[in-house]
Image (spheres, rainbow, N blue to C red):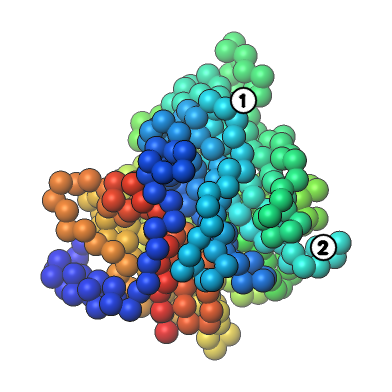
């Protein structure tokens, strides 16, 4: 961090005086040892839906991992008991990416989509072509109270080396590991791609390389309410990994990307002018420092015709700490409005704040759902940004 620690602490103390928080998912409670990978959306009726991975036995990414959800009827002050949406026994279901479709003429009140991943082996083994990751889609036509049967969309959005896994088959151009965002997906509200649902993702291709160089971020999208999907061009940076995106003006979009390569401790930003099919430019944004972690980005309004963006991530380059929200008033060109959310000052180097996801509450208030205290809590906090 570039500023003195005492200044960050002062900003955080002032901010905390005006921020309300609630623990939504807590380790060791409601049937799971650890909860990770938060995602959150708001519904047209004002409800909030919070999603996470419920890890039954511990913190490992692979194993008995369920997709779980809670609902808030009062803007995030209180939350329902846990609901398990997907449970594949001892296999994983993770990386929840929810979004609301507001433009389906057959369902004018809105359809909730939840995209997620399954896998039959650890990440490294799948990178070694010893397993497969798949992509699934859930739909709810009653704002998440009930859900349709999950649909496997892997063949449309993935380029797997061999779904059946044949150890003698190797194609270095095909994809192996695969993961949605994590965090929310989004739908274009305006412009030539109005109605398009875009889900950021990432994949590995070929054998493992040094510093995860075989990873690249990409996205997938649907223009017909989940019937058919297309895949975007991949981000050019080797090691580009977990990604999340937001709509800009005139049919453009921005994607914020984790640099798994680790050579530069900052986010990668990519911009598209064709609804996320190809990328006009991508670059490291030093105004968004990052310790190699996940982030969230959200369109929160307009000013003088330009999209206002909120971006959250752990901004300490040495460890997962100092969760920060930054606001851009010029569609991601500059990030001068900085709001500290939480900072531990912990010298033990244990992760304090890690993954997060943002949601709009009203024209001046954000909600942030984030991991805290070495992954033992997922907390919801309200943040006034105006």
Q: Position of residue 175 (x, y in %)?
A: 58, 32
Q: Position of residue 96 (x, y in %)?
A: 56, 47
Q: Is residue 83 above or below residue 185?
A: above
> SS class of the residue under badge 2?
loop
Residue 180 position in % (x across, y down): 56, 45
How many angstroms separate mark 2 from mark 1 (CA)?
37 Å
**Res 124 quadrant in image:** top left
Q: Judge whether residue 346 can be spotted in this image.
A: yes
Residue 341 shown left or right of residue 296 in the figure: left
Residue named by callout 1: 161
* Label ID, residue 213: none
Mark nearer the viewer, 2 or 1: 2
Residue situated in front as seen by the camera: 246 or 216 = 246
- Please state if 51 lies on the left or on the right of 151 as rendered: left
Name the N-terminal-most of marks 2 and 1. 2
Quadrant in which the C terminus appears: bottom left
Residue 13 position in % (x across, y down): 22, 73
Q: Residue at x 69, y 60 (%)?
A: 143
Taking the image as shown, residue 104 lies to the left or right of residue 60, namely right
Which residue is identified by label 2?
Answer: 107
Q: Residue at x 60, y 23 (%)?
A: 171
């Amino acid at each position: 961090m570039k500023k003195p620690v005492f200044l960050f602490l002062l900003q955080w103390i002032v901010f905390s005086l005006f921020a309300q928080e609630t623990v939504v998912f807590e380790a060791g409670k409601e049937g799971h040892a650890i909860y990770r990978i938060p995602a959150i959306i708001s519904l047209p009726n004002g409800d909030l839906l919070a999603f996470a991975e419920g890890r039954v036995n511990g913190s490992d990414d692979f194993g008995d991992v369920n997709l779980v959800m809670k609902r808030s009827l009062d803007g995030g002050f209180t939350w329902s008991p846990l609901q398990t949406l997907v449970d594949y026994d001892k296999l994983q279901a993770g990386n929840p990416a929810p979004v609301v479709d507001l433009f389906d003429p057959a369902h004018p009140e809105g359809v909730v989509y939840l995209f997620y991943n399954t896998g039959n082996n650890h990440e490294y083994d799948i990178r070694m072509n010893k397993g497969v990751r798949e992509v699934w889609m859930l739909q709810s036509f009653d704002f998440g109270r009930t859900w349709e049967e999950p649909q496997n969309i892997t063949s449309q959005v993935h380029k797997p080396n061999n779904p059946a896994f044949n150890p003698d088959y190797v194609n270095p151009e095909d994809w192996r590991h695969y993961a949605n965002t994590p965090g929310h997906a989004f739908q274009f509200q305006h412009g030539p791609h109005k109605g398009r649902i875009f889900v950021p993702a990432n994949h590995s291709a070929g054998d493992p390389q040094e510093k995860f160089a075989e990873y690249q971020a990409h996205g997938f999208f649907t223009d017909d309410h989940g019937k058919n999907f297309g895949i975007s061009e991949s981000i050019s940076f080797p090691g580009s990994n977990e990604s999340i995106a937001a709509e800009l003006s005139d049919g453009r979009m921005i994607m914020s990307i984790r640099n798994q390569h680790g050579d530069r401790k900052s986010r990668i930003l990519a911009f598209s002018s064709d609804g996320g099919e190809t990328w006009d430019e991508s670059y490291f944004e030093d105004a968004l420092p990052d310790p190699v972690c996940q982030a969230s980005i959200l369109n929160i309004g307009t000013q003088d015709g330009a999209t206002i963006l909120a971006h959250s991530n752990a901004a300490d380059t040495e460890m997962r700490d100092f969760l920060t929200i930054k606001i851009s008033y010029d569609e991601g060109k500059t990030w001068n409005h900085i709001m500290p959310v939480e900072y531990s000052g912990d010298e033990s180097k244990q992760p304090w704040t890690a993954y997060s996801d943002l949601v709009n509450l009203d024209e001046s208030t954000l909600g942030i759902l984030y991991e805290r205290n070495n992954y033992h809590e997922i907390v919801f906090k309200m943040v006034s940004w105006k």
